[in-house]
Protein backbone atom coordinates (compact mmCIF):
# COMPACT_ATOMS: atom_id res chain seq x y z
CA UNK A 1 0.00 0.00 0.00
CA UNK A 2 1.35 3.45 -0.91
CA UNK A 3 1.78 5.77 2.11
CA UNK A 4 -0.96 8.38 2.33
CA UNK A 5 0.17 12.04 2.20
CA UNK A 6 0.82 13.57 5.58
CA UNK A 7 -1.34 16.66 6.26
CA UNK A 8 0.29 19.83 7.61
CA UNK A 9 1.53 19.24 11.14
CA UNK A 10 1.99 21.83 13.85
CA UNK A 11 5.35 21.93 15.63
CA UNK A 12 3.73 21.27 18.98
CA UNK A 13 5.37 18.24 20.51
CA UNK A 14 3.11 15.20 20.54
CA UNK A 15 3.71 12.19 22.77
CA UNK A 16 5.00 9.18 20.82
CA UNK A 17 2.48 6.43 20.30
CA UNK A 18 2.84 3.35 22.45
CA UNK A 19 3.88 -0.12 21.36
CA UNK A 20 0.24 -1.07 21.67
CA UNK A 21 -0.59 1.26 18.75
CA UNK A 22 1.89 -0.57 16.49
CA UNK A 23 0.54 -3.95 17.56
CA UNK A 24 -2.97 -2.79 16.69
CA UNK A 25 -1.77 -1.43 13.33
CA UNK A 26 -0.29 -4.81 12.49
CA UNK A 27 -3.59 -6.61 13.19
CA UNK A 28 -6.25 -4.15 12.00
CA UNK A 29 -7.66 -4.70 8.50
CA UNK A 30 -7.67 -1.95 5.92
CA UNK A 31 -10.35 0.62 6.70
CA UNK A 32 -11.17 3.92 8.38
CA UNK A 33 -10.18 2.71 11.87
CA UNK A 34 -6.72 1.63 10.74
CA UNK A 35 -6.22 4.80 8.68
CA UNK A 36 -7.08 6.99 11.68
CA UNK A 37 -4.70 5.09 13.98
CA UNK A 38 -1.94 5.21 11.36
CA UNK A 39 -2.33 8.98 10.96
CA UNK A 40 -2.35 9.51 14.72
CA UNK A 41 0.82 7.42 15.09
CA UNK A 42 2.62 9.32 12.34
CA UNK A 43 1.64 12.63 13.92
CA UNK A 44 2.95 11.46 17.28
CA UNK A 45 6.40 10.67 15.89
CA UNK A 46 6.78 13.63 13.51
CA UNK A 47 8.60 15.83 16.10
CA UNK A 48 11.41 13.26 16.16
CA UNK A 49 11.56 13.32 12.36
CA UNK A 50 11.87 17.12 12.43
CA UNK A 51 14.69 16.90 14.98
CA UNK A 52 16.54 14.51 12.69
CA UNK A 53 16.01 16.89 9.76
CA UNK A 54 17.54 19.74 11.76
CA UNK A 55 20.86 17.85 11.79
CA UNK A 56 21.12 18.54 8.06
CA UNK A 57 20.54 22.29 8.22
CA UNK A 58 22.96 24.72 6.56
CA UNK A 59 23.69 22.36 3.67
CA UNK A 60 21.98 24.42 1.01
CA UNK A 61 18.50 22.91 1.32
CA UNK A 62 15.49 24.76 2.83
CA UNK A 63 14.41 23.39 6.20
CA UNK A 64 10.83 23.03 4.96
CA UNK A 65 12.05 20.64 2.25
CA UNK A 66 14.15 18.69 4.73
CA UNK A 67 11.20 18.36 7.10
CA UNK A 68 9.02 17.08 4.28
CA UNK A 69 11.65 14.46 3.37
CA UNK A 70 11.98 13.47 7.02
CA UNK A 71 8.20 13.23 7.33
CA UNK A 72 8.04 10.85 4.36
CA UNK A 73 10.80 8.81 5.98
CA UNK A 74 8.73 8.59 9.14
CA UNK A 75 5.69 7.49 7.10
CA UNK A 76 7.80 4.66 5.65
CA UNK A 77 9.09 3.75 9.11
CA UNK A 78 5.55 3.54 10.55
CA UNK A 79 4.29 1.48 7.60
CA UNK A 80 7.22 -0.95 7.60
CA UNK A 81 7.83 -1.39 11.32
CA UNK A 82 7.14 -4.88 12.62
CA UNK A 83 6.66 -4.93 16.44
CA UNK A 84 6.96 -8.73 16.38
CA UNK A 85 10.71 -8.41 15.87
CA UNK A 86 11.05 -7.11 19.42
CA UNK A 87 13.00 -3.92 18.64
CA UNK A 88 11.88 -0.52 19.83
CA UNK A 89 10.34 1.67 17.15
CA UNK A 90 13.01 4.37 17.65
CA UNK A 91 15.72 1.85 16.77
CA UNK A 92 14.05 1.29 13.41
CA UNK A 93 12.80 4.81 12.71
CA UNK A 94 16.03 6.76 13.24
CA UNK A 95 18.09 5.02 10.50
CA UNK A 96 15.04 4.96 8.20
CA UNK A 97 14.48 8.72 8.41
CA UNK A 98 18.21 9.51 8.33
CA UNK A 99 18.66 7.30 5.28
CA UNK A 100 15.82 9.09 3.51
CA UNK A 101 17.48 12.45 4.18
CA UNK A 102 20.87 11.22 2.92
CA UNK A 103 19.29 9.81 -0.23
CA UNK A 104 17.65 13.17 -0.83
CA UNK A 105 21.04 14.90 -0.76
CA UNK A 106 22.61 12.17 -2.88
CA UNK A 107 19.95 12.02 -5.59
CA UNK A 108 18.35 15.46 -5.78
CA UNK A 109 20.77 18.20 -4.71
CA UNK A 110 23.76 17.74 -7.04
CA UNK A 111 23.86 20.27 -9.89
CA UNK A 112 26.34 18.05 -11.76
CA UNK A 113 25.79 14.31 -12.23
CA UNK A 114 28.44 12.45 -10.23
CA UNK A 115 28.62 8.63 -9.92
CA UNK A 116 27.62 7.15 -6.58
CA UNK A 117 31.17 5.90 -5.90
CA UNK A 118 32.61 9.38 -6.42
CA UNK A 119 29.94 10.88 -4.14
CA UNK A 120 31.02 8.47 -1.41
CA UNK A 121 34.67 9.41 -1.99
CA UNK A 122 33.71 13.06 -1.68
CA UNK A 123 32.18 12.46 1.73
CA UNK A 124 35.23 10.49 2.94
CA UNK A 125 37.64 13.13 1.67
CA UNK A 126 35.60 15.99 3.14
CA UNK A 127 35.51 14.35 6.58
CA UNK A 128 39.22 13.48 6.52
CA UNK A 129 40.19 16.98 5.36
CA UNK A 130 38.07 18.61 8.07
CA UNK A 131 39.53 16.43 10.82
CA UNK A 132 43.09 17.01 9.60
CA UNK A 133 42.59 20.78 9.37
CA UNK A 134 41.53 20.84 13.03
CA UNK A 135 44.60 18.85 14.10
CA UNK A 136 46.99 20.78 11.88
CA UNK A 137 46.03 24.14 13.29
CA UNK A 138 44.22 25.33 10.20
CA UNK A 139 46.88 24.36 7.67
CA UNK A 140 45.45 22.80 4.53
CA UNK A 141 46.34 19.08 4.48
CA UNK A 142 48.15 17.61 1.50
CA UNK A 143 46.71 14.96 -0.78
CA UNK A 144 49.03 12.34 0.77
CA UNK A 145 47.91 13.28 4.30
CA UNK A 146 44.24 13.02 3.33
CA UNK A 147 44.88 9.65 1.70
CA UNK A 148 46.52 8.33 4.86
CA UNK A 149 43.75 9.73 7.07
CA UNK A 150 40.93 8.28 4.93
CA UNK A 151 42.82 5.07 4.08
CA UNK A 152 42.36 5.75 0.37
CA UNK A 153 44.70 5.76 -2.65
CA UNK A 154 45.79 9.24 -3.68
CA UNK A 155 43.98 8.77 -7.03
CA UNK A 156 40.69 8.35 -5.15
CA UNK A 157 41.46 11.40 -3.01
CA UNK A 158 41.92 13.48 -6.16
CA UNK A 159 38.54 12.25 -7.43
CA UNK A 160 36.92 13.18 -4.14
CA UNK A 161 38.51 16.63 -4.15
CA UNK A 162 37.26 17.21 -7.68
CA UNK A 163 33.77 16.12 -6.65
CA UNK A 164 33.83 18.70 -3.84
CA UNK A 165 33.73 21.35 -6.56
CA UNK A 166 30.93 19.59 -8.48
CA UNK A 167 28.14 19.77 -5.90
CA UNK A 168 26.83 23.08 -7.17
CA UNK A 169 27.21 24.87 -10.50
CA UNK A 170 27.66 28.58 -11.13
CA UNK A 171 25.06 30.13 -13.38
CA UNK A 172 26.35 31.59 -16.63
CA UNK A 173 24.15 34.61 -15.89
CA UNK A 174 25.93 35.22 -12.59
CA UNK A 175 28.36 38.10 -12.24
CA UNK A 176 31.84 36.89 -11.17
CA UNK A 177 32.90 38.00 -7.71
CA UNK A 178 34.75 41.28 -7.84
CA UNK A 179 34.00 41.80 -11.54
CA UNK A 180 33.81 45.38 -12.69
CA UNK A 181 30.95 46.58 -14.80
CA UNK A 182 28.59 43.71 -13.94
CA UNK A 183 29.58 41.53 -16.89
CA UNK A 184 27.90 38.11 -16.80
CA UNK A 185 30.08 35.01 -16.84
CA UNK A 186 28.63 33.92 -20.19
CA UNK A 187 29.95 37.13 -21.76
CA UNK A 188 33.46 36.32 -20.53
CA UNK A 189 33.66 32.86 -22.05
CA UNK A 190 35.73 32.43 -25.17
CA UNK A 191 34.44 30.95 -28.40
CA UNK A 192 36.01 28.89 -31.16
CA UNK A 193 38.01 30.99 -33.63
CA UNK A 194 37.16 29.57 -37.05
CA UNK A 195 40.19 31.35 -38.49
CA UNK A 196 42.24 28.60 -36.85
CA UNK A 197 40.81 26.11 -39.33
CA UNK A 198 41.98 28.32 -42.19
CA UNK A 199 45.46 28.64 -40.67
CA UNK A 200 45.77 24.86 -40.30
CA UNK A 201 44.56 24.32 -43.86
CA UNK A 202 47.08 26.79 -45.25
CA UNK A 203 49.96 25.17 -43.40
CA UNK A 204 48.92 21.76 -44.73
CA UNK A 205 48.65 23.14 -48.27
CA UNK A 206 52.08 24.86 -48.36
CA UNK A 207 54.17 21.79 -49.32
CA UNK A 208 51.83 20.98 -52.24
CA UNK A 209 51.93 24.58 -53.46
CA UNK A 210 55.72 24.59 -53.43
CA UNK A 211 55.77 21.49 -55.64
CA UNK A 212 53.60 23.09 -58.35
CA UNK A 213 55.19 24.58 -61.49
CA UNK A 214 55.64 28.35 -61.35
CA UNK A 215 52.83 29.07 -63.84
CA UNK A 216 50.29 27.03 -61.79
CA UNK A 217 51.38 28.79 -58.59
CA UNK A 218 50.94 32.13 -60.30
CA UNK A 219 47.44 31.21 -61.50
CA UNK A 220 46.35 30.11 -58.00
CA UNK A 221 47.82 33.27 -56.49
CA UNK A 222 46.00 35.51 -58.95
CA UNK A 223 42.72 33.60 -58.52
CA UNK A 224 42.58 33.14 -54.73
CA UNK A 225 44.77 35.95 -53.34
CA UNK A 226 44.25 38.71 -55.93
CA UNK A 227 40.64 37.64 -56.58
CA UNK A 228 41.04 37.86 -60.37
CA UNK A 229 38.55 36.17 -62.68
CA UNK A 230 39.56 33.32 -64.93
CA UNK A 231 39.12 35.61 -67.93
CA UNK A 232 41.40 38.22 -66.40
CA UNK A 233 44.05 35.58 -65.62
CA UNK A 234 43.83 34.28 -69.19
CA UNK A 235 44.38 37.75 -70.61
CA UNK A 236 47.24 38.40 -68.19
CA UNK A 237 49.06 35.18 -69.16
CA UNK A 238 48.07 35.13 -72.83
CA UNK A 239 46.25 31.79 -72.71
CA UNK A 240 42.63 30.73 -73.09
CA UNK A 241 40.10 30.89 -70.27
CA UNK A 242 39.37 27.16 -70.76
CA UNK A 243 43.06 26.39 -70.24
CA UNK A 244 43.09 28.49 -67.07
CA UNK A 245 40.04 26.58 -65.75
CA UNK A 246 41.72 23.20 -66.40
CA UNK A 247 44.96 24.30 -64.72
CA UNK A 248 43.10 25.58 -61.65
CA UNK A 249 41.16 22.29 -61.29
CA UNK A 250 44.28 20.16 -61.74
CA UNK A 251 46.41 22.28 -59.40
CA UNK A 252 43.78 22.33 -56.66
CA UNK A 253 43.40 18.55 -56.88
CA UNK A 254 47.16 18.07 -56.49
CA UNK A 255 47.40 20.50 -53.58
CA UNK A 256 44.38 18.91 -51.88
CA UNK A 257 45.84 15.41 -52.20
CA UNK A 258 49.16 16.61 -50.80
CA UNK A 259 47.45 18.35 -47.89
CA UNK A 260 45.55 15.18 -47.01
CA UNK A 261 48.77 13.18 -47.06
CA UNK A 262 50.41 15.81 -44.87
CA UNK A 263 47.50 15.68 -42.45
CA UNK A 264 47.59 11.90 -42.22
CA UNK A 265 51.34 11.97 -41.60
CA UNK A 266 51.27 14.61 -38.89
CA UNK A 267 47.69 14.16 -37.63
CA UNK A 268 46.87 17.84 -37.90
CA UNK A 269 43.43 18.40 -36.21
CA UNK A 270 40.66 20.38 -37.81
CA UNK A 271 41.76 20.02 -41.47
CA UNK A 272 38.81 20.16 -43.87
CA UNK A 273 39.20 17.77 -46.77
CA UNK A 274 37.32 20.14 -49.09
CA UNK A 275 39.71 23.09 -48.59
CA UNK A 276 41.51 24.63 -51.50
CA UNK A 277 44.54 26.85 -51.67
Image (cartoon, rainbow, N blue to C red):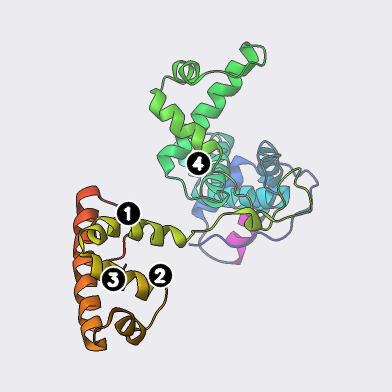
Q: Is label 1 in contact with label 3 (beta carbons under 8 Å)?
A: no
Residue bearing mark 4: 83
Upstream in sequence: badge 4 or badge 3: 4
Upstream in sequence: badge 4 or badge 2: 4
- CA separation in Å, label 1 and label 3: 14 Å
Residue bearing mark 2: 225
Task: From the viewer's side, name the closer residue of 86 and 170.
Answer: 170
| Res 274 visible | yes
Q: Is label 2 in contact with label 1 (beta carbons under 8 Å)?
A: no
Local packing at callout 3 (Cα closer than 10 Å; few below 14, some 14-19, many 20+) is few
Q: Position of residue 201 (x, y in %)?
A: 34, 60
- CA separation in Å, label 4 and label 3: 77 Å
- CA separation in Å, label 2 and label 1: 25 Å
Q: Is mark 4 on a helix, strand or loop?
A: helix
Q: Residue 215 carries which label?
A: none
Q: Quadrant of residue 264?
A: bottom left
Upstream in sequence: badge 2 or badge 1: 2
Local packing at callout 2 (Cα closer than 10 Å; few below 14, some 14-19, many 20+) is few
> In the figure, 5 relative to 85: above or below?
below
Determine if the magenta segment contains residue 34: yes
Residue 242 as seen in the image, left or right of residue 117: left
Closest to the camera, between mark 1 and mark 4, is: 1
Q: Which mark is residue 269?
A: 1
Task: From the viewer's side, name the closer residue of 212 and 130.
Answer: 212
Residue bearing mark 3: 274
Q: Is label 1 in contact with label 4 (beta carbons under 8 Å)?
A: no
Task: From the viewer's side, name the closer residue of 144 and 273.
Answer: 273
Q: Give the range drawn in magenta.
A: 32-38
Amino acid sequence: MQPAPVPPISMETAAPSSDEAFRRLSTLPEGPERDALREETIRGWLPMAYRLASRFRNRGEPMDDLRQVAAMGMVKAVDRYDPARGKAFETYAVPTVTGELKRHFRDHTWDVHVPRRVQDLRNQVRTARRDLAQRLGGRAPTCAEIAAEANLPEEDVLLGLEALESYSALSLDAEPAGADGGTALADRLGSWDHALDVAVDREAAKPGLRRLPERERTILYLRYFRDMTQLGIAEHLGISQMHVSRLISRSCARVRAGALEETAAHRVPGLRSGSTA
